[in-house]
Amino acid sequence: MVKRSLLVCFALIASACASAGEPVLHDHLTKFVDVSIGECFSFDEPESTTVSGVEVAPCTTPHTYELFFLGDTTAPEWGDVEMFRSEAVASCAPALEIYTGALIADRIFDFAYFTPSVREWEAGVRTFGCYAFALDGSQATDTVLAVSPNRRMARRDLVDGTCFAAPSSDLVFTVAVRDCSQADREM
């Protein structure tokens, strides 16, 4: 009886110690700051700007969100929520137009953003990210990245032989694709 009680006590102490540290991510979850532009994902905490993990999935499978912009905050301290919000809105809104090829007024997508967790902030992470989702709350089975009418594609999608015009300084993650006879560059 004493042996069994000690074993149960040890198990309880061990589980308490495990939960006191960093959140444990399951094999299928990724830290938010490790998601790349163009990756699609889902998570269960849509109202939070700090999330312990997201489930990254191919954009061709059902998903709720797609990361379309990463930036660095200039907030002097972690708790400066208003600065986080103003920087995210100032960056995310135009980036969403470029990424989806749709004007904000005409869009069928909206955006939200994530900020570093307290632990990430203390480790020097200043990255925030903007992610798109359908206004009607539906899941997508494709990317929201515009392919037409502006014929934009992410640099990650360029393959050998693809012709494109050099991106302007504000087109951080997309390039305008042109007919190869008029191309400035070829991959």
Image (cartoon, grey):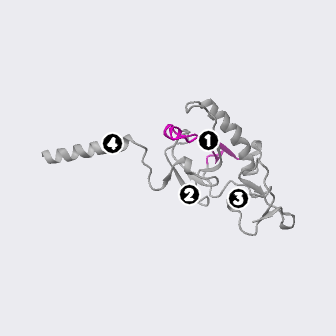
Q: Residue furthest bottom?
A: 161
Q: Is residue 91 magenta?
A: no
* Residue type beneath disc 3: Arg
Amino acid type at circle 1 is: Tyr
Closer to the camera: disc 4 or disc 1?
4
Structural crowding at the residue carrying mark 1, measured as other residues with C-alpha within 10 Å and reported as few (<14), some (14–19) or many (≥20): many
| Furthest residue toward left | 1
* Cα gap from disc 3 to disc 1, whole angstroms: 22 Å
- Say whether residue 88 is left or right of residue 77: right
Q: CA distance from mark 2 to mark 3?
A: 19 Å
Residue 124 in percent (x, y) is at: 54, 40
Q: Residues within 10 Å of mark 4 (few under 14, many from 20)?
A: few
Marks 2 and 4, how far apart at CA? 31 Å
Q: Residue at x 61, y 46 (%)?
A: 137
Question: How much space separates mark 1 and mark 2, taking CA atoms?
Answer: 19 Å
Q: Which residue is mark 1?
A: 113
Q: Specify the farthest residue to the right.
A: 182
123, 87: nearer the viewer: 123
Q: Could you say which disc has been placed on residue 155 in the image?
A: 3
Where 48 falls versus 30 (above or below)? above
Q: Which residues are magenta?
A: 108-137
Quadrant containing the C terminus is: bottom right
Mark 3 secondary-structure assignment: helix
- Residue tagged by mark 2? 57
Residue 146 pos. (x, y %)? 73, 55
Q: Which residue is mark 4?
A: 17
